[in-house]
Image (cartoon, rainbow, N blue to C red):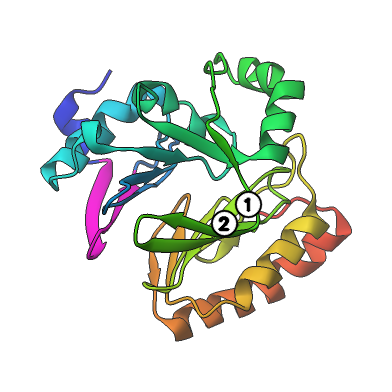
Amino acid sequence: MRNGEEKREEEADMKIDTDLYGYIWKSATENNSNSFFVGGEVPLLIDPGHQHLVKNLINLMEKDGNRFEDVRLIIATHGHPDHLEAIQTFARGGVQVALHEEEWKFLREIGGQFYRAMGMEMPDLKVSFFLKEGELKLGSKTFQVIHTPGHSPGSVSLYWPEKKALFTGDVLFAMGVGRTDFPGGDGSLLLQSIERLARLEAEWLLSGHGEILKGKRNLQQNFAFVRESYSDALTGGEEPM
């Protein structure tokens, strides 16, 4: 087991804008999701990651003045362990948990088998409310919830128009797309979801893995690259590399 100092080097914190922070997983040897924190009247944490790595996230959040105790809402972009598992650390009295209803149904059907296949147990997940397509108001902040299946049946992306920030989970990355060979994956649906996101006026791509992408032009170039590189594989049923 690596010590805490080595663990901290695997994740980097970044203040993106007022009330917006990214915690970007850097390790090349251990998988975990990026996490994002949105401050304000309803402090929001998006994708808390793996349970055994969550102390690292909490330390980085607190370094930025974002206390673990302040989180009031956790959103899981989808139900895979590297995004969802650490919800059990945050989900205490007063903290709400939200995901899409299709993902909840999917997890109830095969979630236990999927987690055990990865050597884990699915957390005891109590959902406070289901995310629905459309506006999500958190105090003075308004987000757009977009159902973006393909990587998983109930994957959601969030768009924050005020910051032009797009949170994509594992639907879309910088220079890449989510895999479709897990249960519930569908390449054609994934491509359709990506095309929906391409129509947004986004200037930040905040994805579940990899680096943050900044600038409208860079995001447009990324969408063009994905179309050129992955469209045939996704619609033809081949797994993207």
Looking at the picture, how far across and down is residue 135, in whole percent? 55, 61
Q: Where, by quadrant of the figure, is residue 47 drawn? A: top left
Name above or below for residue 231 compared with residue 118. below
Looking at the picture, how far across and down is residue 238, in whole percent? 81, 53
Q: On the rendered image, what quadrant is the N terminus found in? A: top left
Which residue in the structure is indicated by mark 2?
Answer: 157
In front: mark 2 or mark 1? 2
Looking at the rendered structure, the kind of residue marked 1 is Gly
User: Over which residues does the magenta segment extend?
Assistant: 10-26
Residue at the extreme front of the image, as rendered:
139
Judged left or right of residue 58, residue 78 is right
Name above or below for residue 179 compared with residue 53. below
Which residue in the structure is indicated by mark 1?
Answer: 178
Judged left or right of residue 208, residue 211 is left
Judged left or right of residue 237, residue 157 is left
Looking at the picture, how far across and down is residue 33, in whole percent? 44, 42
Judged left or right of residue 14, residue 52 is right
**Residue shown at the point (65%, 57%) measured from the top left:** 133
Residue at the extreme right of the image, as rendered:
236
Q: Secondary structure at mark 1?
A: loop
**Residue shown at the point (70%, 62%) measured from the top left:** 193
User: Badge 2: few (under 14), some or many (20 or more) residues near its Cα, within 10 Å?
Assistant: many
Q: Earlier in the sequence, mark 2 or mark 1?
A: 2
Looking at the rendered structure, the kind of residue marked 2 is Ser
Kindly identify which numbered label has been placed on residue 11. Answer: none
Q: On the rendered image, what quadrant is the C terminus found in? A: bottom right
Q: Is residue 117 magenta?
A: no
- Asked if marks 2 and 1 touch (Cβ < 8 Å), the reply is no
Q: Secondary structure at mark 2?
A: strand
**Residue shown at the point (76%, 44%) measured from the top left:** 185
Report, in whole angstroms, how far the alpha carbon at label 2 lies from the one at label 1.
13 Å
